[in-house]
Amino acid sequence: MNNIFKNIIDAADKDIKQLAVLIDPDKMRVETVSSFITKVNQSIATHIFVGGSEVDEGVTETLVAEIKRHTALPVILFPGDVIQITDKADGILFLSLISGRNPDYLIGKQVEAVSKLVKTKLEIIPTGYVLIENGKETAVQRVSETKPLKRNDLQTIKDTAKAGELLGMKLIYLEAGSGATHPIDLYIISEVKRQLNIPLIVGGGIRTKIELDSAYNAGADLVVIGTAFENDVTFFDKLKKQQIFNS
């Protein structure tokens, strides 16, 4: 499956909004995958992201293999570390934490990953990762030892995202962090989108259908939801394909 990025681009060009369900290998048990993915398949989800900030070696590969047994959706790695790379997935967001200044997460981990990546058939999608404060310390902040951008510093957020595009990133990912107390402000999404000529991903803190639609309307091309589904699997009921199409 080597057309993941093309499909994201094509959807963005046609203003077709996409949704990724984020699965954290540290929180999802293999024996619950079948029932969870059944709900994903019945929803409007277009992608499955797999990854977390703190995951033991080997866990991601086992989980991805099980997920692939139950869905035809593209499974994309969203890795917090090199040990989460597995050829069982379809693609990988090759992340650079451009909002931080820790060289390990700007380029160090990426260099470390190359020897693994060149041996895989993964579709590699360079992605500028921009962490924005949300009211509490996130796992990304703790593990990467970087500070998020202040949400009231709009100019720096816009310039950082645009710098990622100019550096050659194919996607920009605005992230409030797992379990964020609130989503990224809509005016931030809107203003960043106006700066970019590449697709914009938005994640963190989105827990309702209204918040999802608001992120789309503000300019997000692809929204990522994780914690909301972990805490309330019935959230999928609000995002069923037929229900959305008939609304």
Image: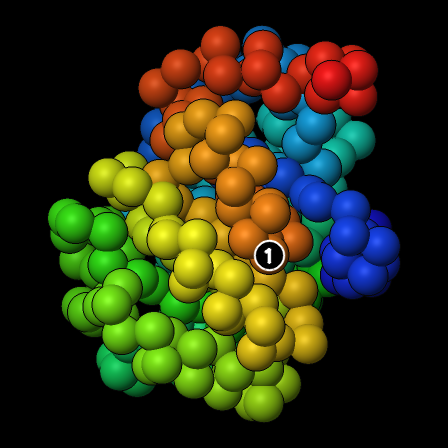
Residue 135 visible in rendering: yes
> Is residue 29 or residue 233 the one in the foreground?
233
- Residue annotated with mark 1: 219
> Which of the 4 image quarters holds residue 130?
bottom left
> Which of the 4 image quarters holds residue 3?
bottom right
Q: State the image coordinates of residue 18 (x, y, percent, origin top left).
A: 69, 43
Quarter placement of the C terminus: top right
Residue 25 visible in rendering: no
Element class at badge 1: loop
Q: Residue at horizontal 49%, vertical 87%?
A: 163
> Is residue 138 or residue 57 the one in the foreground?
138
As drawn, is 64 to the left or to the right of 208? right
Q: State the image coordinates of residue 9 (x, y, percent, origin top left).
A: 78, 62
Q: Residue at horizontal 15%, vertical 48%?
A: 136
Amino acid residing under circle 1: Gly
Q: Is residue 131 above or below residue 56?
A: below
User: How many dots with numbers?
Assistant: 1
Q: Is residue 176 above or below residue 236?
A: below
Q: Is residue 40 above or below residue 128?
A: above
> Is residue 117 or residue 236 the one in the foreground?
236
Question: How many other residues sit within 10 Å of disc 1, few (<14), some (14-19) or many (≥20)?
Answer: many
As drawn, is 203 to the left or to the right of 77? left
Q: Residue at horizontal 55%, vertical 53%?
A: 218
Q: State the image coordinates of residue 151 (x, y, percent, origin top left).
A: 27, 64
Q: State the image coordinates of residue 169 (x, y, percent, origin top left).
A: 60, 78
